[in-house]
Image (tube, rainbow, N blue to C red):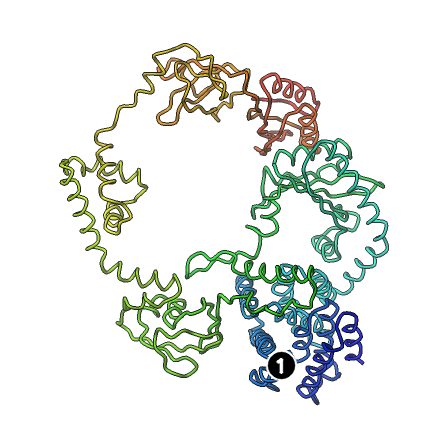
Amino acid sequence: MEYSQLIEILKTYMTEDKIKIINKYYEEATTIYEGMKRLTGEDYINHPIRVAKILAELKMDVITIGCSLIHEGITLEKITYEEILEKFGEESAIIVNSITKLSHLKRTFKANNTEKYRRIVVGLSENPISLFIKLADRLDNLRTITVHNKEHVKDIIDETEKIFIPIAHRLGIKTMKSELEDLCLKNSNPELYQSVLDKINSDKDELEKSLYKMRDEIIEILNEHNIKFEILYRVKSVRGIYNKIKAGKKWEQIYDLLGLRLLVNKVEDCYLIIGLIHGKYRPIPKRFKDYIANPKNNMYQSLHTTVFGVDGRIYEVQIRTYEMNEIAEHGVASHWSYKEKVDGSKVSELENKLATFRTLIEINDKEGNEDFFKNLSSNLQKEDIYIFTPKGDIIELPVDSTPIDFAYKIHSEVGNTCIGALVNGKLVSLDYKLQDSDIVDLKTQKGKSPNKSWLKFVKTEGAKSRIKSYFYKKEKEKTIKTGKDILIEEIKKQKLNDKELLSNEILDILLEELKLDNLEELYIGISTLKYTPNIIVNKLNSILNPKKDDTIEKLLANKDIIKHTENGQILIAGYGDILTNLSSCCNPILGDEIVGYITKGNGVAIHRKDCKNLNLDNKRIINVEWNNSFQDKFTTLITIYLDSSNDNLVSVLTLATKIDVSIVSINNKGTIKNDEIYDLVCKVKNLDNLKRFMNELESLNFISKVER
């Protein structure tokens, strides 16, 4: 009956010829699983048939369905790789063999290495089919998991949540991911799962209607203000609601049951939109969160608010830039960045592989299943192999790695003292290219040292760097002496005084300029050609005999304002073509009385005349004035003291939007008595614009003070 149901599904999208091929796999499956029973008491073959049905619902191709029927054959030692190769071809043999490798992985794993475990799972899958079948296999096992003891159920759920659900998510298999999540919850807390499901189902249609209406209203508001945006929306999932309840929330306290997310290009647009939304919908007190000004520890940034929206329902609205969304979804907070401790930094290799798999899936969605896997092997070039130690631990290495790479991956001392290797029980040369799933037993001898010839064949950067490091340390003193001799020779070549140039005072300045800790680093850099000797000598000479900079004299010679400069914000006395910058200590804006301060090597710094950091009697002070033809907003900072008992910050943002002041960031500076102190970094047109904003803020009854 199970197989008949599978065939009925396949008939909806496969030809008779393809179904005949499936029948050949099924015939082999009946032989493989003959006489075997599962713990449920049913015939063992029903499990692989159900796995095939799960994949058929996704309209997978012939090879995927066929391999799912025989996927446990090698694991159960009922068929060999060579037999599958002969009967069904290389691709099927590779797929089933990959699933066998996955089945042999230890199921226990610590919380601190789940990322590595995921990475190995993906790495052992030489194409997406292996992962699809493994995920479908796990899904069917979860559907029948109640026959197992509690400890086994707990282990399976833990592994599914930490390993397989994240992989399904990154592959974009949403239906499978969603059911895996639900089954994990259902089997770990069945009563709560059912109560949440019943509550959602009773209201779902009405909730979705309200959500669509709210979405349309927000789109209309933002279009009126010509804001470029993208909007996403959802009714919270069973698992999401469960997480809230688990954290101690009651049903009526779950304010993000209906959610909308707005993605924009600029931070300023985030604050503008929050003002527009609060101008239209009443916010719920104390539900506004500014994670842009105050990011979470994991670098997450976003504005969150909860408002009373259409149909009297409550909606959570999140607003963030595309860059913030990328970090939230895939970046610093993500589990997909894996940093090697041995080979140096290797970021997101797992993500790259899954991205390749997902791209193929998306192509399949657009072009159909007919030719999806026809030339898959040519599209997926394997970059890593997985080598086993005699104890069964897995070491990940690039393709074409050697026993020496393997040795250094384990430990530097193992690599340094390696004298031989047995691969699968046979003695091989140290430049032997390891193959996927080889078992390597290394031979070491105390007192032995690396051979420089190893550098010609090792593959990993870790091995190369450790071999080089060994010989580098051996030759360090010689290298330092060589570097010093080269430098002195260059000094004499330029007919300069080496005692003057190499005095402690001059060398200290040079080391600081090059950001070096000591002279040894300098001499090593010269010896290894990191620094050319003539450039170092020129730097030493320029420190000893600096060139005169007459910029100060030119600026001080003329106190008149230049009127014809039209390109910049500031007009400079006596000198038109010079760098200027607005000082961050006082943040001057158009309309402020200003002066210029001539810096050393960084042009003229523009300060307000009343800046506390400025001495107006200093000879470096020059006359400057604003260029009124320059049209732009200016950044400044104000501090506000407001009553913290309500969400009054929302009103501040709304006010800023009304009078064309852009809030760039908000920083909570702490509390004094009943007042919360906030620094607002704003963009304003000019001094009048800023004064109006500050006056309007001071008129609000919940603000006790506004300072610039």
Residue 383: x, y in percent?
49, 65
The residue tagged with tag 1: helix, strand or loop? helix
Point out the image quarter for the C terminus. top right
Depth check, front residue: 208 or 10? 10
130 lies left or right of 488: right
Q: Where does the image place residue 284, in percent across and percent down from the top left?
A: 75, 38
Q: Quadrant of residue 442?
A: bottom left
Q: Is residue 479 depicted above or below 434 in this figure?
A: above
Quadrant in the rendering for residue 302: top right
* Vertical arrangement, residue 650 with respect to residue 192, above or below: above
Instruction: Tell me if residue 697 comes above or below residue 530 in the rendering.
Output: above
User: Which of the pair 281/548 is nearer the observer?
Assistant: 548
* Residue name at image x 79 percent, y 41 percent: 216
> How packed is label 1: few (under 14 Cα within 10 Å), some, or many (20 or more)?
some
Question: Could you tell me the amino acid type at mark 1?
Answer: Phe
Left or right of residue 384, residue 150 in this image: right
* Camera-nearest residue between 350 and 375: 375
Q: Which image quadrant is residue 159 in?
A: bottom right
Marker count (numbered)? 1
Which residue in the protein does label 1 denote? 88
